[in-house]
Amino acid sequence: MRYLLVNPAYGHLYQKSRFNAIMTHGFIPLNLLCVAGELLRLGHRVVILDLNYTPEGDIVEYIKRFDPDIFGITATTPLSDKAKQLCAKAKSYKPTLKTLIGGVHATVMPEDYKDCADIDNVYCGEFEEYRHDLDSIPFPAYELIYPERYTSSPLLSRRSPVGLLETSRGCYGKCCYCTRAVQGKTLRFKSPMLVIEEIKYVLGRGFREIHFIDDNLTADQNRAHDIFEKCIKDNISFTWTPRNGVRANRLSRELLSVMKRSGCYRIPIGVESGSQKVLDRTGKGVRLEEVERAVQWCKEIGLETELYFMIGLPGETEEDLQKTCDFAAKLKPDFAKIAPAIPYPGTGLNDYLQNRGLLRSKDYSLYHYSGRVEEIYTHDTLSWNIINKYIKRFYINLYMRPGYIGRALIRAIKTKTLLESMRVAWKTQW
């Protein structure tokens, strides 16, 4: 069988982003590479078409040249309608082509596609046959893409191109803003030795930096320690960061030290709120003092910190928003981001809003952090004018302080990102 696997373009989603200046590069479609690895193992032929780098019109040209039997596409929630359009385009050229859609939105909302004549099958969850034993599944098929395409802004990476790697799947968390529909609630791990081999494989394909995208890279701290201690012993030279973020209560000073020595340069941490009351309501299960401690360890060891915050969480008051601004300023991170909470289908937040009649729109093209969130839902306690006011206050309080500007200047000179930092600062919508 011949499979044409398609990754829809998503660059347009960031056009109105506050930090659009650095959102200029695509991310590797690791999910499709994992599917391709399994298909190749089963003896099929596979081509991956990443529309972030290829004009949409080339779909027909690829179908002409490759003559696939199956057209597979992945879609996040804001790209669900785009995926339908692309399936229709493929079917219009080759009516006998079988179309298959997968990904997080298809898993959570398969009913969205039941009346779509251009989609033959909806695939829910993970694809690989041996997905419960992660050591048994093939490596992602990195040989099917061009590494040089996946360069990254110097503010998002130290080296380019950047490869992605997962060492585990699943999440035990109960956060109201997240869905665990695809990979489930049970954590599954690749063995440390297999992770080492996969790191070597990705680097061998021409990538110079790796971003780990586990939801819980350091959930088992001993295992994480073993992986990165082995990297040091084997003299594997690469820079890396846990791109999806880590939990503050799953870090230790010793583990952070080993991570730093193995090539890690930045620790992203999901903080969400500076109000413990709001944080508890999300179900995250993290204390603010644990965040403070983790950030302090990072500073002592010499790791950059990048903190992620949410705004517009259920029950937030203006006092809570001020606490978030104050907490971020107190921690003095190297980087921080705040964005409105998005009520993705399948999340507790979505259920909360629906049950109270606060969900205003199911136009899923709006469901991304640079979209018009005020059109999606009405906040239960605050107006969007107040929320947007505190988003601006958050960034101005954090990035416009003389102390931060001085530290950022020194860091930019050390990391040779001064010109890029100036360009982004000039283009950012402060």
Image (spheres, rainbow, N blue to C red):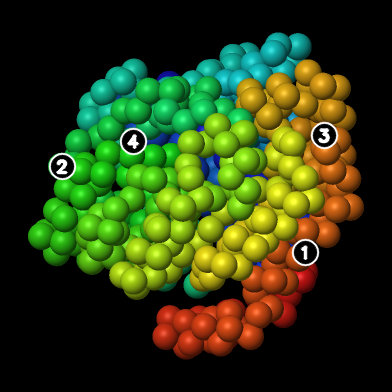
Q: CA distance from mark 3 to mark 2?
A: 49 Å
Q: Mark 4 or mark 1, which is nearer the start of the sequence?
A: 4
Q: Mark 4 or mark 2, which is nearer the start of the sequence?
A: 4
Query: At numbered mark 3, what does the secondary structure look like: helix, strand or loop?
Result: loop
**Residue 392 - label:** 1
Q: Which residue does the numbered mark 3 point to in the structure image?
A: 380
Q: Are marks 2 and 4 in contact (CB under 8 Å)?
A: no
Mark in front: 1 vs 4: 1
| Mark 3 nearby-residue class (10 Å; few <14, some 14–19, many ≥20) | some
Q: Mark 3 or mark 1, which is nearer the start of the sequence?
A: 3
Mark in front: 1 vs 3: 3
Q: Position of residue 180 (x, y in %)?
A: 51, 26
Residue type highlighted by circle 1: Lys
Q: Mark 1 or mark 2, which is nearer the start of the sequence?
A: 2
Q: Which residue does the numbered mark 2 point to in the structure image?
A: 193
Residue type highlighted by circle 4: Ser
| Mark 2 nearby-residue class (10 Å; few <14, some 14–19, many ≥20) | few
On screen, residue 176 versus residue 183, left or right, reads: right
Q: Nearer the viewer, residue 55 or 153?
A: 153
Q: CA distance from mark 2 to mark 1?
A: 46 Å
Q: CA distance from mark 4 to mark 3?
A: 36 Å
Q: CA distance from mark 1 to mark 3?
A: 21 Å
Q: Which residue does the numbered mark 4 point to in the structure image?
A: 168
Q: Are marks 2 and 1 in contact (CB under 8 Å)?
A: no
Residue type highlighted by circle 2: Met
On screen, residue 32 versus residue 235, left or right, reads: right
